[in-house]
Image (cartoon, rainbow, N blue to C red):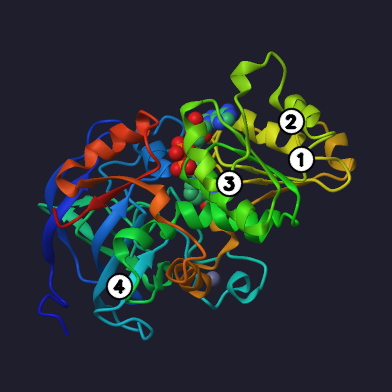
């Protein structure tokens, strides 16, 4: 038992008080974990675009004050009643979507959409009592996707924590808790390209580059990166991209450009932008008869996907996935092992690092389209 178990912990957290305003490092009180909850000391976190969307709250429900952050690695500090498979000292990756291991989804081999713990961006409190575990002077500070990792300590449901190899360096594998696993799994588990096939990846941020990495691992022979930001292209070569298309360079829809480049369409496409136009293009650019498109990006809340039904009748398949179809607790430890055995390289994703006290710099980098992942060191 740690000396802090059962007690309120005072620690630093980066609080978003208002939409789009810089985070403020505050001293927050973190309540002890309740039944089926775990309190985790976060050591490293990184910034994913999903944090930025909800912080900007332009196309999403604004919920403030809130502690964002969902890509992280940490160590269990204490566990609540009923938690049997985690103990203080365990190394964990928090995940924005959980696995209760009991519902129909968790029992299905195909789904990772747990009934109890699937991502819910509008829920800002814990399931157990509908309250937040964070407060400042008694005033609640809201949670984000059940993880809120921009805090030195956080409380999550046990089902949102993957227990990983304690030898895995948390400053590297923390990025597997969202973006990289999402892109990798979208290709390997959902798009499933055959050896020698052609894959288009829309959006060359961390998620898209991980999708390209998945295509490379699967043995695709052509990997076409599509992005509006040409500065992404040089970097994307390291992730197996063989060709690049900037939709801005053409005066016709990018799906037509891709169809011309590939004699009728790509075999697989993976959309990692969150923009509805890119989603539609990603679907319409796959070859009829066998093409499969996978949507990964998180769209604007009012977005509507529009395509002619003939595009589907012509035997194209449209799919979507959360977290690359990985079940967080059952599957994530094996993705960490892929890194440990060097099948998967993570270093090339980690382009920047900042101390926690300068977390807003990570936002500036992402908003400026610079780098891939910025690691935020909670102990600095
Ligand atoms: P990112 O901002 O780093 O990368 C997105 C890239 O898309 C950028 O390089 C941008 O220039 C490009 N882009 C934007 N609009 C485009 C368009 N119309 N055509 C082509 N390229 C375009 O973001 P990221 O962290 O890599 O995340 C990518 C997406 O995946 C986000 O929407 C994020 O919310 C989502 N996401 C989904 C899941 C999931 O489980 N489904 C998990 C994590 C992240
Ligand atoms: Zn479940």
Q: Is the residue marked by circle 4 packed among few (<14), some (14-19), or many (20+) residues within 10 Å?
A: many
Ligand 1 has an atom within 8 Å of the beta carbon of the residue at disc 1: no
Q: List the residue tagged with mark 1.
A: 266
Q: Position of residue 91 (x, y in %)?
A: 31, 73
Q: List the residue tagged with mark 2.
A: 258
Instruction: Find the distance from the CA under tag 2 to the CA under tag 3.
Output: 18 Å
Q: Is the residue marked by circle 2 packed among few (<14), some (14-19), or many (20+) residues within 10 Å?
A: many
Q: Position of residue 29 (x, y in %)?
A: 14, 59
- Farthest-out residue, top: 251
Q: Earlier in the sequence, mark 3 or mark 4?
A: 4
Instruction: Find the distance from the CA under tag 4 to the CA under tag 1.
Output: 45 Å
Q: Say which element carries label 3.
A: loop
Q: Earlier in the sequence, mark 2 or mark 3?
A: 3
Residue at the spot x=34%, y=59% of the render? Answer: 172
Q: Say which element carries label 1.
A: loop
Whether residue 103 can be seen here: yes
Foreground label between 2 and 3:
3
Residue at the spot x=27%, y=49% of the render? Answer: 67
Rendered-image quadrant of the N terminus: bottom left
Whether residue 119 can be seen here: no
Instruction: Find the distance from the CA under tag 1 to the CA under tag 3.
Output: 16 Å
Q: List the residue tagged with mark 3.
A: 240
127 versus 224 height, above or below? below
Q: List the residue tagged with mark 4.
A: 38
């Amino acid at each position: 038992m740690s000396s802090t178990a059962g007690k309120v912990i005072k620690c630093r957290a980066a609080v978003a008080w208002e939409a789009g305003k810089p985070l403020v490092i505050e001293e927050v009180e973190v309540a002890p974990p309740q039944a089926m909850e775990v309190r985790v000391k976060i050591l490293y976190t990184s910034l994913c675009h999903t944090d930025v969307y909800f912080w900007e709250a332009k196309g999403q429900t604004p919920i403030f004050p809130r502690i964002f952050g969902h890509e992280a690695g940490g160590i269990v500090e204490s566990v609540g009643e009923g938690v049997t498979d985690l103990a203080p000292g365990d190394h964990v990756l928090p995940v924005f979507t959980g696995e209760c291991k009991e519902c129909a989804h968790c029992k299905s081999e195909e789904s990772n959409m747990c009934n109890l713990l699937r991502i819910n961006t509008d829920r800002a409190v814990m399931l157990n009592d509908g309250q937040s575990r964070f407060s400042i002077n008694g005033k609640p500070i809201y949670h984000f996707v059940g993880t809120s990792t921009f805090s030195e300590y956080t409380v999550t449901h046990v089902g949102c924590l993957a227990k990983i190899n304690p030898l895995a360096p948390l400053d590297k594998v923390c990025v597997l808790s969202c973006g990289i696993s999402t892109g990798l799994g979208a290709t390997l588990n959902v798009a499933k390209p055959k050896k020698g096939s052609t894959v288009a990846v829309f959006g060359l941020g961390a998620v898209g580059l991980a999708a390209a990495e998945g295509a490379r691992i699967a043995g695709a022979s052509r990997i076409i990166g599509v992005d509006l930001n040409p500065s992404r292209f040089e970097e994307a070569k390291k992730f197996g991209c063989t060709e690049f298309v900037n939709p801005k360079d053409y005066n016709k829809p990018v799906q037509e450009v891709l169809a011309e480049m590939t004699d009728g369409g790509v075999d697989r496409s993976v959309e990692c932008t969150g923009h509805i136009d890119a989603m539609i293009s990603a679907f319409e650019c796959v070859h009829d008869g066998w093409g499969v498109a996978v949507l990964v990006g998180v769209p604007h809340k009012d977005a509507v996907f529009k395509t002619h039904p003939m595009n589907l009748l012509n035997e194209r398949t449209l799919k979507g996935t959360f977290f690359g179809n990985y079940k967080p607790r059952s599957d994530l430890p094996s993705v960490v092992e892929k890194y440990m055995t060097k099948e998967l390289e993570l270093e090339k994703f980690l382009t920047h690092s900042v101390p926690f006290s300068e977390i807003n710099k990570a936002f500036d980098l992402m908003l400026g389209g610079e780098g891939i992942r910025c690691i935020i060191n909670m102990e600095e």
